[in-house]
Amino acid sequence: MYSSLFMQIKEKVTQWLLQNEEMFKSKNIIMEVVEKSDERFYVILDFRKCMSSIIVATPDFAPYRFVAFEMAEMVNGTLTMPYSWYDSDDDTIEDIIENLEKSVNLALEYCRESL
């Protein structure tokens, strides 16, 4: 059984992503829902030059409590991760949404500069 807090966070992050789907499209960000289940919500954001993943899950072992944002790109044939953000036990739902907004904006600017 999943905690009430996990379910609330998963629902809010899902809502936030779906509410921003049109904004993503307007900025040429392709959003692909990879998995939407009781135990996990996993989305890929494709910025053309870079990609990011947003995962909401209850991992057995990970550097996050429930939410992970990771940005990746290929540099000279090598996969690099120039940015990541992970929630912690102290983050509120509002903190998580705020940090996801900052992370998407940072990825958008970074990937635009890399083109």
Image (cartoon, grey):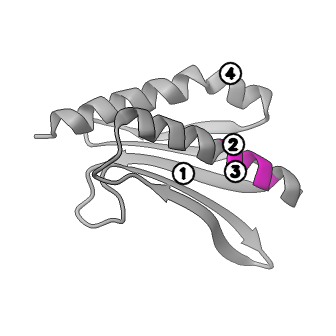
Q: Where is residue 100 in the image (x, y as percent from the top left)?
A: 53, 42
Sequence-wise, the earlier of marks 1 and 4 is 4
What is the secondary structure assignment of the residue under circle 4? Answer: helix
Q: Where is residue 60 in the image (x, y as percent from the top left)?
A: 22, 62
Sequence-wise, the earlier of marks 3 and 4 is 4
Tell me the CA gap for discs 3 and 4: 17 Å
Q: How crowded is mark 3: few (under 14 residues within 10 Å), some or many (20 or more)?
A: many
Farthest residue, direction front: 90
Q: Taking 5 as reference, is 21 above or below it?
A: above
Which amino acid, by three-letter code, is at mark 3? Answer: Ala
Q: Position of residue 97 (x, y in %)?
A: 48, 35
What is the secondary structure assignment of the residue under circle 2? Answer: helix
What is the secondary structure assignment of the residue under circle 3? Answer: helix
Tell me the CA gap for discs 3 and 1: 11 Å
Which range is magenta?
105-111
Residue matched to label 4:
22
Would you say 36 lies left or right of 99 here? left
Q: Position of residue 52 (x, y in %)?
A: 61, 52
Q: Are marks 2 and 3 in contact (CB under 8 Å)?
A: yes
Pick the residue in front: 95 or 17: 95
Q: In which quarter of the image is the N terminus?
A: top left
Badge number at residue 107: 3
Which amino acid, by three-letter code, is at mark 2? Answer: Asn
Which amino acid, by three-letter code, is at mark 1? Answer: Ser
Residue matched to label 1:
53
Tell me the CA gap for discs 2 and 4: 15 Å
